[in-house]
Image (cartoon, grey):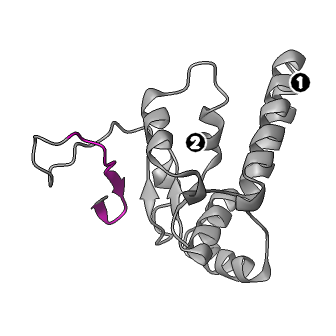
Amino acid sequence: MLGYLLDNNVASELSRPRPDVNVLAWFSAIPDEELFLDAMTVGEIAKGVALVRRRNVARARQLQGWLSAITFVFADRILKIDVATARIWGELSSRTPTPPPADAWIAASALRHGLVVSTRNTRHFEGFGVGLVNPFMPRVPNLLRPATEPDDVLAVQCQNGLHR
């Protein structure tokens, strides 16, 4: 499987009234079929909606509608919780003193399915051996192509350097 597993901070950026321009550019450069959510990410977003509901019911209704929409759009690209991923999670969780359980799960799911984690919080995933991309970072020009061609390839900073 080739693609990107979205952390909640990346997926949630699209629910903002004015999403980050770098994230929007990144999303527009990636085919839909290469973008995935994990069940854990859906749970993290649902938790966020519940927390917002305590202080702003109207905003929580908007976010709940957005969560329903995103789970519909990603329906066949939401990775399920399974035993194989749980075993990887157990291994990853033993590597660092106190990794955030949700982040360790997302890393395990990405490793299981051969995906790159797309997150703003790359430091949370360091040490898990998973590829990382931070779509909040500005686009990097394609220096391998002659300057006469438009820059339509997105280079992303991953754990192992720059990748196209």
**Residue at point 75% right, 57% down?**
40
Element at badge 2?
A: helix
Q: Position of residue 152 (x, y in %)?
A: 30, 43
Mark 1 neighbour class, 10 Å CA radius: few under 14, some 14 to 19, many 20 or more = few
Q: Residue furthest front?
A: 149
Q: Is residue 64 left or right of residue 144?
A: right
Q: Which quadrant is the C terminus positioned in?
A: bottom left
Does residue 47 sit above or below 125 in this rendering? above
Task: Give the amino acid at mark 1.
Answer: Arg
Distance CA(mark 2)–CA(mark 1): 23 Å
Task: Give the amino acid at mark 2.
Answer: Val
Q: Main secondary structure of the magenta part?
A: loop
Q: Is residue 125 magenta?
A: no
Q: Position of residue 151 (x, y in %)?
A: 24, 41
Q: Position of residue 18 (x, y in %)?
A: 56, 19
Image quarter of residue 85: bottom right
Does residue 117 sit above or below 11 in this rendering? below
Q: Nearer the viewer, residue 27 or 158?
A: 27
According to the image, label 1 marks what residue? 54
In magenta, the rendered stretch is 150-162
**Residue at point 49% right, 28% down?**
20
Name the N-terminal-most of marks 2 and 1. Answer: 2
Q: Position of residue 109 (x, y in %)?
A: 64, 69
Q: Nearer the viewer, residue 44 or 91?
A: 44
Q: Is residue 38 left or right of residue 56?
A: left
Q: Which mark is residue 10?
A: 2
**Residue at point 59% right, 66% down?**
107
Q: Nearer the viewer, mark 2 or mark 1?
A: 2
Q: Which quadrant is the N terminus positioned in?
A: bottom right
**Residue at point 57% right, 42% down?**
10
Mark 2 neighbour class, 10 Å CA radius: few under 14, some 14 to 19, many 20 or more = many
